[in-house]
Image (cartoon, coloured by chain):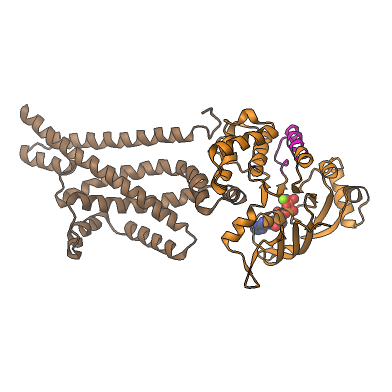
Amino acid sequence: MPAPIIKVDAISKSFGAFKVLDGLSMQVMPGEKLALIGPSGSGKTTILRILMTLEKIDGGHIQVDGEQLYHMERNGQLQPADERHLAKMRQKIGMVFQLFNLFPHKCVMDNVTLAPMLTKGLARTAAEKRAMELLDMVGLADKAKAMPAQLSGGQKQRVAIARALALSPKIMLFDEVTSALDPELVEEVLNVMRKLAAETDMTMLLVTHEMGFAHDFADRVLFFDRGRIVEEGKPDEIFRHPKQERTQSFLKKIIAAGHRV
Amino acid sequence: MTQWSGYLGLILQGALVTIELTLMGSVLALVMAFLAGMGRVSRFFVVRALATTYIEFFRGTSIFVQLFWAYFVLPFARLSLTPLQAGVLALGLNVGAYAAEVVRGAILSVGREQYEACTALNLGRWQGMRHVILPQALLVMLPTFGNNAIELLKATSVVSLISLADLTFQAQVVRSQTGSTLMPFVSVLVIYFALALIISWGIRSLERRMARGLDGVRV
Ligand SMILES: Nc1ncnc2c1ncn2[C@@H]1O[C@H](COP(=O)(O)OP(=O)(O)OP(=O)(O)O)[C@@H](O)[C@H]1O
Ligand SMILES: [Mg+2]
């Protein structure tokens, strides 16, 4: 049995007086595809943002790939991580945002090559070669010279995925990556994610309201409510035979809203 | 007739001094604006305090006083400047203080999601600033920089008070030599206006060039 690649241990996080995460613990195995579902405000985005170091934690510990994320060991003691440690840990993790967050002043190619050239010291030719492979993988090889403003939402999101992949992270975080898209563009992004899952052994955590996709895609589903994991299990268990009352009523609402499960 | 063209020559010489002051003052103002503007958003308290002090001090005292200090008081500290150096120093520091607030505002106007994308891509603070935030902020700064440069152009006339033969100074010279008020003052009016127009036009074409592609227009 291999060791978990992510170990979240009793973390808590508040915004002001509002406790978003309340002693949350979870583990993710290498290569696992994990779907995080749950009602709005339950803390799904927050846990992804914490893993991406966009948000600090108030208490608890997180281990990523065998090392502490927010702490570092010095003289046998755990201390708060400094910027250098965080930078090292960020190499292991990539994130795709709901609103793409592309750099609007850079063409598609430069969006993808910027970080590898700056953070890994890759030469431009090498970075562009790799970028073309990734753009090809997401079906946008012909858009390398386009500016983000010239792309559709689905194309933007596929560029954002290629951009994150260019740093070869072990773990990819996807936060509702299709929920800002017109319905007819959702599938092209989901297809890229299916391909990623099939062709790589990357660990993938995705927050989604696409229950049908979560069902087919995930190895395991976590149901969040009020900053805690209320129920977890295989997609079939969660979607077909939810045990907890909270899960049942959430899924009922989702189905009533017209989503396929 | 030859006399008039001689007087016009004097005024054009003054115009050259004014242009020189404007260009050199703008360069110093630009440098100060970026230093202090970025200093204002630094995560280090000391840097923020220094930047704030500079900005408040130079916005809070008049350009006349600053110029007199640069020219008449600094020599007591064994720092004698030529009138041109004193003029550039006072103008650059003064306008730089205003422009620093423009830099700061523009940096803050770039959305949080751009900073977060930088973090997610593991760019360092400076790398993100240099390659992602500043290029976008620059576009926001440019129009106001244009205003700042025109303010600086207009403020150059204060150097005539320390006997630097700029456009305004030469106009007075011609006026006292000819007894004519209209000719010198109409000329300087036209020249200041033309210079301001050139600045506006330059900034606008720069803006257009930099905005290309951002709005979806093919580059
Ligand atoms: N920066 C912040 N400041 C204050 N409150 C915040 C902040 N970020 C998130 N919150 C609050 O924390 C709670 C959890 O937010 P989070 O975004 O993690 O929920 P979510 O599960 O992703 O919900 P959704 O499905 O709507 O995206 C929400 O109530 C939200 O309003
Ligand atoms: Mg969310």
Chain with colour brown in the figure: B
**Main SS of the magenta segment?**
helix
Looking at the image, can residue B153 be seen? no
- Residue B122 horizontal side relative to residue B12, left or right: right
Report x, y in % for residue A87: 60, 56
Q: Quadrant of residue A195?
A: top right
Looking at the image, can residue A241 be seen? yes
Residue at x 69%, y 31% (from the top left corner): A139
Report x, y in % for residue B158: 21, 49
Report x, y in % for residue A27: 79, 58
Residues in magenta, as a range:
A177-194
Chain with colour orange in the figure: A
Q: Nearer the viewer, residue B128 or A104?
A: B128
Report x, y in % for residue B15: 20, 38
- Residue B43 horizontal side relative to residue B21, left or right: right
Residue at x 18%, y 34% (from the top left corner): B187
Q: Nearer the viewer, residue B217 or A75?
A: A75
Q: Indicate yes or no whether the magenta region holds residue B89.
A: no
- Residue B196 horizontal side relative to residue A166, left or right: left
